[in-house]
Amino acid sequence: MSVNEGKELRIIGFLCNWCSYAGADTAGVGRFAQPTDLRIVRLPCTGRINPLFIVRAFMNGADGVLVSGCHPRDCHYSEGNFYARRRLEVLKALLPVIGVDPGRFEYTWVSASEGQRWRSVVTSFTEQVHALGPMPGFKSGTSLDMCLCHMDQTQAL
Amino acid sequence: MASSIDDLKTEIKKALPGLDMVIAWAAGPDPLSHTPLFITEEADVERIEWDPRCSQNLAGYLPGLRGKKVGIVVKGCDARSLVELLQEKLIDREDVTIFGLHCTGAVDARAARKALGSLRGGLESVSVNGGTASFSMSGEPRTLPLAEVLQKKCFTCTGADAEVCDHFIGEHGEPPRVTETPATTLEELEAMSMEERLHFWEDQMSRCIRCYACRSACPLCVCQDHCAAQSREPHWVDQTDHPREKLMFQAIHALHTAGRCTECGECERACPMGLPIMTLKQALNRSIQDLFDYRAGTDPDQAPPLFEFREEEKNIKEREW
Ligand code: SF4
Ligand code: SF4
Ligand code: SF4
């Protein structure tokens, strides 16, 4: 049930098991219409998130990355999201320097009961990424492209 | 300068009997950069050199020498690396004897070689006075503007005196005054679109030979054989020669030194390809200063900002959507 018309983009969501993943589930159980571009990776806690997960996702061709966890002071492990908040803010400074538009990455807090809020977060973030379009690639393509090209050449021989 | 080098030698001779070694600089095979000197006997003290060719930050040797009593000679920026190592408890204050100096600026060997042309006939001395650098080549003086021959980090030096030290040698002074500095890579990037920035790094990284000298030279890269760049589980970086993987490695280095990097410039100085990799760290440092009002390497009693948190962050706005 795509809210955004046209081609889907690749958006990766890193969701904390205790709040946001459950919140997304609540939205599903409530049958709220949502865009379907987001691929969810479930994590025990936002404190588990290494900012490099996000850089790697972009390097591997993601068009957007969304991180969502428990509201501050609601962390299942007390302080995971507090550490995450600092790390993710610092990451925000790196992305635009390497050429990733800051609008392609957001982090937010959604609790297990906030199904409606989850829907609005996913919808606005997906719209934001669609407004930016697909993530520009490297001129030299990906190494997978190079492999495939090499395979084509070998087969042609 | 002559007097401070003599005072330095005298102080080191006095301290040497109580130490396992003292790390300083000596003339190296390259006329434009001095090389580290590990002093264990008094006779070695005479080999010490101290002038703008003493570029290398020697603080990077300290974590590996932990447990020994080590003396070390430092410039202002080197002292900040040392403070950072103390903050992170990677070295013990009571085991380190610090000989601090006032620095007039460090020569960028690559830029100076280009500016000077042939060095045949030798290079006897290098000094910085006011806004210029003087090179004495076979008795002939050559004078060049600082902006042409100093390391880029010296353009924005935040303190040329070693602030944390046991023995301060010579006179205190100001950082070099460099005028008409070219735009930094960070400023150049700011003028580009996001896509241009990505392609800028793609071009730069296509020249990277993945030697990891930038990592090895960094005084804060202490993981040694456990570097994320070489781990197979998880496999952060693949083995292909693609610019993307090299940029990924630079992201690892920048994020692993976030809030810790003192902009000592060793990563860039060590890079054989002359890649502007300190830019990524500078960008993070600017943001860390704004977010946490923090500058690495200034206070031994502080903790780096990513080692801790506040429940209410003064400068982080909660997302409203
Ligand atoms: S940054 Fe400052 S202390 Fe360091 S080498 Fe340059 S002038 Fe000297
Ligand atoms: S990242 Fe570069 S500038 Fe920063 S501490 Fe390491 S070597 Fe020095
Ligand atoms: S030192 Fe330079 S060439 Fe070597 S890995 Fe680092 S960036 Fe690449």
Image (cartoon, coloured by chain):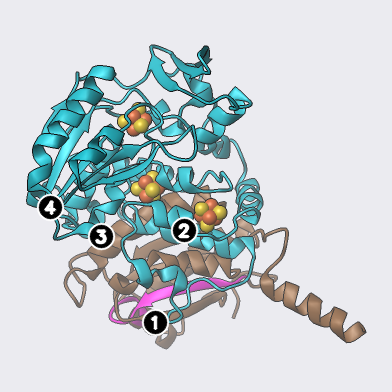
Residue linked to disc 3:
B64
Does the residue at mark 1 contact the one at mark 2 (Cβ under 8 Å)?
no
Residue A12, magenta (yes or no):
yes
Label 2 or label 3, whichever comes before in sequence order: 3
Of tags 1 and 2, the one toward the viewer is 2
Is residue B193 in view?
yes
Q: Amino acid at mark 1?
A: Arg
The N terminus of chain B: image quadrant: top left
Front residue of this view, candidates B89 and B254: B89
Residue at left offset 37%, top offset 40%:
B286
Residue linked to disc 2:
B251
Q: Colour of chain A?
A: brown
Front residue of this view, candidates B41 and B20: B41
Q: Position of residue B143 (x, y in %)?
A: 51, 13
> Seen in the image, is B19 located left or right of residue B262?
left
Residue linked to disc 1:
A42
Q: Is mark 2 within 8 Å of ligand 3?
A: no
- Determine if marks 2 and 3 fall on one subunit: yes
> Which picture quadrant has residue A100?
bottom right
Mark 3 residue element: helix
Mark 2 residue element: helix
Region in magenta: A9-21
Q: Position of residue B294 (x, y in %)?
A: 24, 42
